[in-house]
Amino acid sequence: MVPVRILFAEDEPTIRKYVSRGLAEAGYAVDAVKDGQEAWLAAQTVDYDVAILDIGLPGIDGFEVCRRIRARSDHGPAILFLTARDAVEDRVLGLDLGAEDYLVKPFAFAELLARVRVLLRRGPSGPAVLSSGELLLDPAARRVTVHGDEIKLTAKEFALLEYLMRNAGRVVTKSMIAEHVWNFDLDGESNFIEVFVYSLRKKVDGPLGRPLIQTVRGSGYRIDALDSP
Ligand code: CA
């Protein structure tokens, strides 16, 4: 069996050693690099399954490495940011750039391993296409189409739609969405989720010719049960 290959970019030597040793012990083939330039060079020469990128790296930062990896290919590694920064804007920027996940330092190594396993499950052999009438969402190709025409979504709009479709037929609350799509607790005052639901509806409902996402007053959102595969 081909080992899972992980790129790990971290400039802090202690964390770099500790995490790369742990990943190797878990059976992964790990390339640990200490700056953004090395990370970018490695990403161009090896087909990694997962890239774990610290944001604050010398030279090119983790955001830029992510942007370059995503600009280079549609089939690059799953990307997880590892960072001391926990500002919402940073998390949103990372996900907008095409990262799949985010882990804020300090973290438990067991949690990092669990996140890596989740990313690997989403890989190329991952779930089949989800469909609701003429709307198709392909999680592996990260593509949404209506009547065969692609709808361009941002990374977080895609994640939101995928989450709603995976929970089709059920009501999902805003805090469930915040936790599962963005990995953070929702501040009670925030209209964050509403803004993303609004932009998603604007892109999808027109081509689809019907409202896809229903608002369930006082609770959250719901998409009707999907077509069976
Ligand atoms: Ca750093």
Image (tube, rainbow, N blue to C red):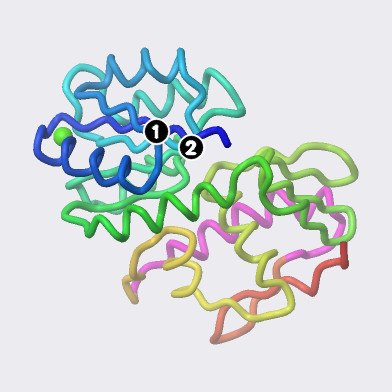
- Looking at the image, residue 228 sits to the left or right of residue 177; the answer is right
| Label drawn at residue 62 | none
85 left or right, relative to 219? left
Kindly identify which residue carries mark 1. Answer: 29
**Residues in magenta?**
189-212
Give the image location of residue 9, x and y in percent.
27, 30
Q: Quadrant of the C terminus?
A: bottom right
Image position of 169 (left or right of 58):
right
**Residue 192 in picture, x, y percent from top left:** 43, 62
Q: Callout 1: helix, strand or loop?
A: strand
Q: Earlier in the sequence, mark 2 or mark 1?
A: 2
Q: 185 or 70: which is nearer to us?
A: 70
Residue 59 lies, in percent from the top left, at: 20, 17
* Residue 186 vertical position relative to residue 148 in the rendered view, above or below: below
Question: What's the residue at 58%, 61% (across, down)?
Answer: 197
Q: Residue at coordinates 38% horizontally, 40% vertically from top-left?
A: 94
Main structural element of the magenta stretch: helix, strand or loop?
helix
Q: Is residue 202 magenta?
A: yes
Amino acid carrying label 1: it is Ala
Place residue 27 in its image quadrant: top left
Q: Give the CA separation, mark 2 to mark 1.
A: 6 Å
Label 2 beta carbon less than 8 Å to ligand 1: no
User: What amino acid type is highlighted by mark number 2?
Assistant: Val
Ligand 1 in which quarter: top left
Instruction: For the N terminus, give its image quadrant.
Output: top right
Q: Which residue is mark 2?
A: 4
Is 218 or 155 nearer to us in this picture?
Answer: 155
